[in-house]
Image: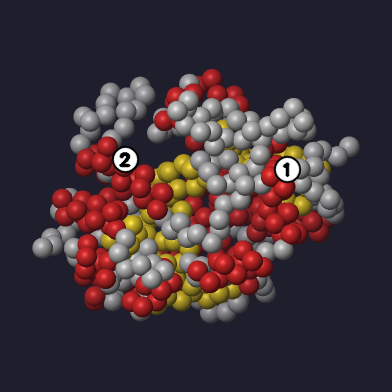
Amino acid sequence: MRGPDLNYGYEQWVRRDETVDEHLDSLLVVLQHKAQSGSQEQGSRVQAGKESENERDRDRLRADVITWRGIATKLCTAIFAENSHDAWELNVLQVGKTLYLEEFVSPAARREKVQSTDRRLLGFMYQGYAFESFCTSPAIPAPKDQPSSSKTSTSRDPPGWGGTVCNNVQWCAICKTSLGSNRLIIGGEVDCIQPSALPKYATSDLLHNPRLDSDDFVELKTTAEIRNARDRERFEGTKMLRFYYQSFLLGVPSIVTGFRDRAGFLADVQTLSTLQLPRIVRAQHPKLDAGKGLAFANQILDWVRQYIAQDPTASQLSNAPPPLAEAEADFPVFRLAFTPSGGIGIPSHGPQHGGTLAIRRLPTQDVLRDIKEGQQAGRVGFLLSSYFDFARQRLVASGGAVVS
């Protein structure tokens, strides 16, 4: 017996505008807000306003890297790259000791991708969101004074439907983690929490509590159903490894995976333990060792930092950031590019694995055209000017740099 139709509700899908480059903006705004306003933590002896700005900002100041979870995943999986679809480019800049990384896709390429994506690929994408709707319910009502952004459903919807798919709004968690010697602050979308965890939190806590327990987080994934041994071999390879990194980096303990048939109906559901995935992958592909991906990601970050340190101008401006107006006009931004090729630069893990890494400093005009989209003010490289100015002032206040 087939499960629900994951194509249901496609015509009502409220899609995010993928031509808009959101950079690291929301992640950085939250980090700045935390430092400047503080927070009241339930059950803590430290109350809002009594914690110094240095204490509230300690984790950010100590961070070696600030980025999205998806970027960290790309670094971890590079060593296992299989084909051209695994290629990527990142923008990198450094303020103080902290590297900031974002994915780079040119404005023209973003527009072209949106225009060229066919109905079949959009269908696969939508089926993943529909699975999330069938797995969740709008358990967190919007405050009375705000319009609801949560999903809505009607009596005509199929059983279990959580509401209209809208990926304009996402709930993200921010956490501390590490890759070798590199301390990271990463942000990543969390799909939902375990139903059993709901009694732990009042509605107001779910909306405002800054410290939910990551042990309650659940990742929701969809993939093609496994029909034969070849399908299982493919699933229990780099795909499962990618599932592992995405959840492990954010501290998500379990992954609920929906398997869809060729018509887009749910064929099966399995719950996978995040920490068990590396063992499953190794049993099928002994060379796909998750630990090697984590170690190599650490090496990439160290290599990038060493490269920037060898650029006298970039190194000086990173350690002693200039005033905002000067930084908006010209601040060093680097482009890190990975090309799967099985060539020099990354150890080979089979005839189709491997690739090359390259890094270069971008000309000022490229930053203005491709990252700032012609707007001089408002950004330092790809960072919001307001955040850069805050980070610069905090760097000076903490004794990390002396600037005029």
Which residue position holds label 2? 34
Which residue position holds label 1? 9
- The amino acid pointed to by label 1 is Gly
* Left or right relative to 123: residue 103: left
- The amino acid pointed to by label 2 is Lys
Question: Where in the figure is residue 223, as x and y percent of width and height?
Answer: 72, 51
**Quarter residue 288 falls in:** bottom right
For numbered disc 2, what is the local secondary structure?
A: helix
Question: Where in the figure is residue 86, as x and y percent of width and height?
Answer: 60, 67
Let me know if residue 81 appears in the view: no
- What is the quadrant of the C terminus in the image? bottom left
**Quarter residue 371 falls in:** bottom left
Q: Residue at x 69, y 50 (%)?
A: 126
Q: Residue at x 60, y 30 (%)?
A: 138
Question: Where in the figure is residue 192, as x and y percent of width and height?
Answer: 58, 36
- Relative to 278, does residue 104 appear above or below in the rendering? below
Image disc number at residue 263: none
Counting residues from the N terminus, which is met first, the one under dot 2 or under dot 1?
1
